[in-house]
């Protein structure tokens, strides 16, 4: 089947996605209504996060949780973060939630969270974190099943960092990072190093922009890393993927725009799968997908676009200025397009105008990507859209010619 080149044509439903997108366990649980709550804030039981944490440790100790516990934080500026190790033992059934109180906006200033050796099953939810020179959230080796969500992480060294100490230990595992805004950090924004095989790392619905490092960096020796519905723009790099053994990296329905010299840089690793992404490189000597060496890349049904003398990609060291060059070099992206995706405002608003060539043009990813970056369900209208937005309304640009009536 040849996919249509117009948005009114049929979507690319006939394409088979490789069955490599094992998702692991999705940690989307909200705390139960009867969770044991430790409140932090002005006129609350505890004034600081460490006070609440110490009280929880005193009450529960190092035994596995038999109910959920929540450290609930109210409006305020907090200068002390938290470091978790093995003092507490949340479980997959009874997690620890460290989260903002509903309607509140707690700020960690000059502090962050460390999920240290042996910590597991912790959800960090809803904080603004600014920690100049330090990490927003640091995840250390032998820690498992953490969730970082709903946070605004800015002016840190890195927003989220995972790292191990050696190559014979379990590494950070099953981390899920979703619905965060990460901006104006001074190094790699999401830096995942030394992730071992068996790890499922998921990153979705994040907006990552104007960081002085790449949006994502993945290094290690094998994991299942899945990214979808992320919007990454104006960073000094897009996604850098350096794995020393089996992947896979699955990238679906992301929007990458104007991320310096590369949007996707895939150095090594065996299995990389890319569908439904908008990859728009901007500027001289910049490139969209940079594929190096032995990577096994499967890429199709993307919008690979380049402007201001950028290249669509680079295949094994040879620049591919256009989509046709890229297709000829690597035999990839046969059903992709290379066209202005028609963002509502490039660099600011990445919704699609209703006339976008990406609309209804994507491959169907039922059960993999069932919603968009703002949690609109997919698909809308005749099929999946390419990029992080599924156009849910008929956004039409305002008229620029003809009779324009102004209200005064
Ligand atoms: Ca659609
Ligand atoms: Ca939408």
Image (tube, rainbow, N blue to C red):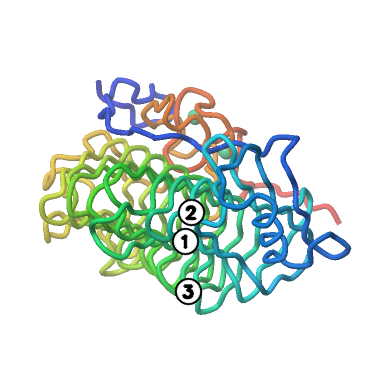
Question: Residue beneath label 1, please?
Answer: 116
Along the viewing direction, whichever of 349 and 370 lies nearer the viewer? 370
Return the disc, 1 or 3, that comes first in the chain's sequence. Answer: 1
Please tell me in which quadrant of the rendered image residue 187 appears: bottom left
Whether residue 120 is visible here, answered yes or no, is yes
Q: Position of residue 19 (x, y in %)?
A: 27, 28
Q: CA distance from mark 1 to mark 2?
A: 6 Å
Q: Is residue 281 left or right of residue 331?
A: right
Q: What residue is drawn where x is 67% and y is 62%?
A: 54
Give the x, y percent position of residue 264.
Answer: 30, 55
Residue that carries the numbered disc 2 in the rendered image: 119
Q: Measure the alpha-carbon separation of dots 3 and 2.
A: 22 Å
Horizontal relation, residue 226 to residue 82: left or right: left
User: In the rendered image, which quarter contains the C terminus?
Assistant: bottom right
Q: Residue at x 25, y 40 (%)?
A: 299
**Is the residue indicated by label 1 positioned so its CB lies within 8 Å of ligand 2?**
no
Residue 259 x/y as whole percent: 39, 63
Write down the residue under mark 3.
Answer: 157
From the image, which quarter does the N terminus lie in?
top left
Give the mark nearest the N terminus, 3 or 2.
2
Say what secondary structure mark 3 lies in.
Answer: loop
Mark 2: few/some/many CA within 10 Å (<14, 14-19, 20+): many
Pointer 1 and pointer 2: residues touching (CB < 8 Å)?
yes
Q: Position of residue 380 (x, y in %)?
A: 54, 27
- The image quadrant that residue 239 belongs to is bottom left
Q: Which mark is residue 75?
A: none
Element marked by disc 1? loop
Whether residues under marks 3 and 2 lie with C-beta atoms below 8 angstroms apart, the answer is no
> Crowding at label 3, few (<14), some or many (≥20) Cα neighbours within 10 Å?
many
- Residue 276: quarter of image: top left
For marks 3 and 2, give the one nearer the viewer: 2
Separation of residues labelled 1 and 3 (CA atoms): 18 Å
């Amino acid at each position: 089947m040849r996919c249509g080149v117009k948005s009114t044509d049929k979507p690319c439903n006939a394409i088979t996605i490789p069955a490599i997108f094992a998702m692991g366990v999705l940690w989307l649980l909200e705390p139960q209504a009867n969770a044991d709550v430790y409140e932090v804030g002005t006129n609350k039981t505890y004034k600081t996060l460490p006070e609440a944490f110490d009280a929880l440790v005193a009450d529960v100790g190092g035994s596995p949780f038999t109910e959920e516990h929540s450290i609930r934080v109210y409006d305020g500026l907090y200068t002390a973060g938290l470091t978790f190790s093995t003092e507490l033992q949340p479980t997959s059934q009874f997690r620890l939630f460290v989260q903002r109180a509903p309607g509140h906006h707690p700020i960690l200033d000059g502090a962050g969270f460390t999920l240290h050796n042996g910590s597991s099953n912790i959800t960090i939810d809803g904080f603004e974190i600014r920690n100049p020179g330090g990490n927003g959230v640091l995840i250390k080796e032998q820690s498992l099943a953490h969730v970082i969500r709903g946070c605004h992480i800015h002016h840190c060294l890195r927003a989220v960092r995972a790292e191990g100490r050696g190559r014979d230990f379990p590494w950070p595992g099953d981390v899920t990072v979703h619905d965060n805004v990460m901006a104006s950090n001074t190094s790699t924004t999401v830096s995942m190093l030394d992730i071992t095989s068996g790890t499922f790392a998921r990153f979705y619905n994040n907006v990552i922009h104007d960081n002085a490092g790449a949006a994502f960096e993945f290094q290690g020796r094998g994991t299942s890393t899945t990214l979808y519905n992320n919007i990454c723009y104006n960073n000094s790099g897009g996604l850098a993927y350096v794995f020393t053994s089996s992947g896979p990296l699955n990238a679906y329905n992301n929007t990458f725009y104007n991320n310096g010299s590369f949007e996707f840089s895939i150095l090594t690793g065996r299995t990389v799968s890319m569908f439904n992404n908008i990859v728009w490189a901007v500027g001289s000597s910049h490139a969209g997908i940079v594929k190096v060496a032995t990577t096994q890349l499967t890429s199709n049904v993307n919008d690979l676009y380049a402007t201001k003398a950028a290249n669509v990609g680079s295949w094994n060291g040879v620049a591919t200025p256009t989509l046709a060059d890229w297709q000829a070099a690597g035999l990839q992206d046969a059903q992709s397009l290379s066209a202005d995706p028609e963002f509502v405002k490039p660099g600011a608003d990445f919704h699609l105008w209703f006339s976008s060539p990406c609309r209804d043009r994507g491959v169907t990813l039922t059960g993999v990507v069932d919603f968009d970056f703002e949690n609109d369900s997919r698909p809308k209208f005749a099929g999946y859209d390419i990029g992080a937005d599924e156009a849910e309304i008929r956004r039409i640009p305002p008229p620029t010619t003809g009779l324009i009536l102004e209200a005064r």
